[in-house]
Image (spheres, rainbow, N blue to C red):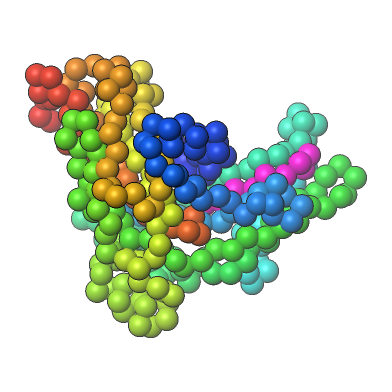
Amino acid sequence: MTMRTSLLKLMIRIFSAAAVVSLVLGVGTAIVTATEPCGDFGECKALIEINAKDGDIGFHFLMDGDDLNSAKILDPDGKKVFEDKAKGPLKKQKLTETFAESAEPLCWPDPDADPDEEIVTLEEFLERWTAGYYVFTGMGDEGEKSSGMTELTYYLPAAPSNVDFDGSVISWTAGDDLGNCASNMELDDLVDDGVLPEHPEDVEVSAWEIVLEPDVDDGDATGALKFTVRVAGDIDPKEVTVPADYLASLPDDTPVKIEVGAIGVDDNATFSEEDGFCNEVGGCEEE
């Protein structure tokens, strides 16, 4: 995912943002969280994240421990999938929060992609990342051990659809597929075959994450001016008004892109991106 702050980083600060979101939008915001507490850890989480438009899929995780020299994760079969060791000055200062995401291979044969790029279909990805409890462990200076576990599930929320921006309001509707990663019919087959426990269109959405980002070169300072907010999964109508003072802070006629993510009750997330919008005064230039 290239257009937003990492979902896992957002989890870390979402509690401070929740009160602001509720006041601005006038809704009761249901915020999903990592497993907390997670045994000896303050929190931990493993989740699946899908970009429906780009058609890619990744494994994300978060752990938060105290004064660790090393940390690792075991999958439900007891196989090690991650290990980190502090060295030099980091070993003196210790590890606490660790969050990371895997590479996100394409889950479909994108005709515009490099022909040598790896394709991992949704079913192949699920075979690679077993559902069940992932065990997080850590070790301190004197050999003291920390451990905890969190569950990875295959309850994947459907990709938001009909994402739109009219210049002040971002709107969307609930979807029924996973975009380029799986059509509605393909998902029916995965449910019938027992690969998925529930069709994504029936998976409960706990929260929606909405991002507006100026579509500018990375070297332009405007690129740092993102608008990001989370709202309750049962919001109706499904729309968010972008603050006028934020829009006024952007240069006139700035191209903007919109992303809306469906966050499931188990924190699995599916995002839809749309571009071609404009913070319009005279009109954005066509590429």
Q: Which residue sits at x=35%, y=82%?
A: 192
Q: Is residue 7 visible?
A: yes
Main structural element of the magenta stretch: helix, strand or loop? Answer: strand
Say whether residue 57 is visible: no
Split into 4 quadrants, where in the image is the N terminus? Answer: top left
Q: What span is in magenta?
A: 59-68
Q: Is residue 260 above or below residue 246?
A: below
Q: Is residue 43 left or right of residue 265?
A: right
Q: Nearer the viewer, residue 47 or 37?
A: 37
Q: Is residue 214 left or right of residue 20?
A: left
The percent position of residue 146, horizontal first and vertical second, equals 79, 52
Residue 40 image offset from top left, x and y in percent: 77, 52
Is residue 167 placed above or below 47 in the rendered structure? above
Q: Nearer the viewer, residue 14 or 272?
A: 14
Q: Residue 223: where, in percent of width, then height?
A: 34, 24
Residue 222 found in image quarter: top left
Q: Residue at x 21, y 55 (%)?
A: 111
Q: Residue at x 13, y 19 (%)?
A: 281
Q: Is residue 36 above or below residue 186?
A: above
Percent of width and height locating residue 210: 35, 41
* Magenta stretch encompasses residue 183: no
